[in-house]
Amino acid sequence: MILALAAALVAVPSAYADVYVIVANTTVHRGAYLRGTGDGSGLPFYLVPKRLAPAYGDRSKRPPRGRYVFLGRLRRTRNFYAEQHFRFRVPRVRPGKYKVAIWCRRCGGSLILAGPTGFGQTVTVLP
């Protein structure tokens, strides 16, 4: 049992422990600002319908497209892990439940959900 737990911890990519994003306002109107804090110099942020959100550990060789709506990027900093505050305007998407996904090429193409757990935070977009 302990060996299995230790092996699982070693197998988890370090990107999940290193890159983090927390959304401050999880209810937002279209055209208003989604705010939060995180790290990952220059990483792109996307809004994706909750039902299409990536699972913990999903990867992509290229930036996401299709139902992923680009929100913006964190500023580029010398220190990749420098904490930053962000503010992205929510585009005219359909009202509903969404997740915020970050694509990290440097982390092996990881799709990382904003939030304190691998399940991510759910953002409700209102008209």
Image (spheres, grey):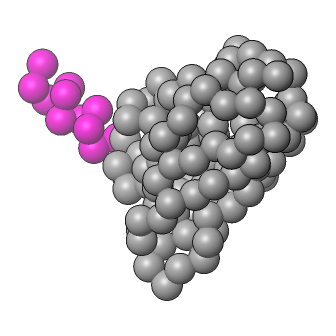
Residue 117 position within the rendered picture, expressed as x and y whole percent measured from the top left: 39, 31
Residue 52 position within the rendered picture, expressed as x and y whole percent measured from the top left: 73, 21
Above or below 94: residue 87:
below
Residue 64 location, quadrant: top right
Q: Which residue lies furthest to the left in this view?
A: 2
- Is 8 magenta? The answer is yes
Question: What residue do we see at 75% from left, 48% from top?
Answer: 89
Q: Which of 110 and 43 is in front in this view?
A: 43
Question: What residue do we see at 55% from left, 69% from top?
Answer: 41
Tell me where the magenta segment starts and ends, as one range: 1-11
Residue 53 position within the rendered picture, expressed as x and y whole percent measured from the top left: 67, 25
Question: What residue do we see at 10% from left, 26% from top?
Answer: 2
The reply to whether residue 7 is in sight is yes
The reply to whether residue 105 is in sight is no
Count of all numbered marks drawn on residues in the image: 0
- Is 115 magenta? The answer is no
Q: Quarter of the image containing the N terminus?
A: top left
Above or below 90: residue 19:
below
Q: Nearer the viewer, residue 67 or 122?
A: 122
84 displayed left or right of 7: right
Q: Residue furthest bottom?
A: 78
Above or below 27: residue 88:
below
Residue 61 position within the rendered picture, expressed as x and y whole percent measured from the top left: 73, 51
116 displayed left or right of 42: left
16 displayed left or right of 92: left
Residue 44 location, quadrant: bottom right
* Predominant SS of the magenta segment: helix
Residue 42 location, quadrant: bottom right
Question: What residue do we see at 20% from left, 26% from top?
Answer: 4
Q: Quarter of the image containing the C terminus?
A: top right
Above or below 58: residue 89:
below
